[in-house]
Image (tube, grey):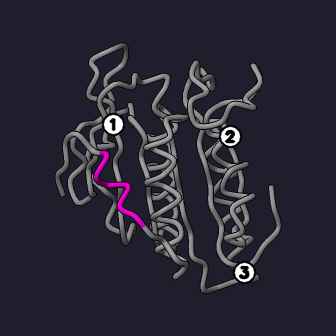
Amino acid sequence: MTNNDSGICILFKGFAGVSTDDSADSSKSGSETGMDLLAAKIGSAGMGLEVHVHDHEVQADAVKAVVRYLKQHPKGPVIVIGHSFGGDSAVEATETMGDKGINVDLLIQIDSVGVGDETKPSNAKRGINIYSTSGEGVDGARHVAGSANCGLASTSHTEIDTDKRTWDIILFELRNLLGLTTGGDPWAACDEKSG
């Protein structure tokens, strides 16, 4: 966790909590997941975000962290990101925040697997769904209604959370949300687009 005041970013790990590819970060060790690595990347990117990583089953802790943060920084923004079952948890945590009157500024699902994760919650201002088109292993949600959808070829379910293209889109969107210089168009890497 980093302690900053530009916003809070919650990341949810998937069921296995493991990624088998290190294409986005060559310093990955066996105990780090794609979400751990992404959190470190976000934390070191100079955006001033408070970053938390949670297992997919501890949504209540993530929501509590957001509530605590917003008491000190009521303007947020609030960002929620999840991979695999963590993508489903990101949707569920966003819905729980909505029940508490909290809007999520950016919800990002990465090859989300779950029930009811095919529609962006109404309290999420912007939704992004990044999914694998490879057909290898688990198939995440290919189209999330109300979200911008990006299908990436040549990456599997267990690789997409560390795929450089995924990270480029996420970092671009975070910078854009925070009003920072973005440059380039990482969305050009999408093999399928909708929304």
Work out how far the residue at label 1 is from the one at label 2, CA to CA, in angstroms: 18 Å
Estimate how packed mark 3 is, as few (under 14), some (14 to 19) or many (20 or more) residues with alpha carbons within 10 Å: few
Judged by depth in the image, the label closer to the viewer, 2 or 3, is: 2
Q: Nearer the viewer, residue 11 or 184?
A: 184
Q: Amino acid at mark 3?
A: Lys
Of labels 1 and 2, earlier in sequence is 2
In the visual, does 18 lie left or right of 181?
A: right
In the visual, does 148 lie left or right of 49?
A: left
- Numbered badge on residue 37: 2
Please give the range of residues in magenta.
184-189
- The residue under label 1 is 131
Q: Amino acid at mark 2?
A: Leu
- Numbered badge on residue 90: none
In what quadrant of the picture does the N terminus appear?
A: bottom right
Residue 22, compared with residue 170, is above or below; it is: above
Q: Position of residue 32 (x, y in %)?
A: 73, 29
Work out how far the residue at label 2 is from the one at label 3, CA to CA, in angstroms: 28 Å
- The residue under label 3 is 71
What residue do we see at 28% from left, 46% from top? 150
Q: Position of residue 55 (x, y in %)?
A: 65, 36
Estimate how packed mark 1 is, as few (under 14), some (14 to 19) or many (20 or more) residues with alpha carbons within 10 Å: many
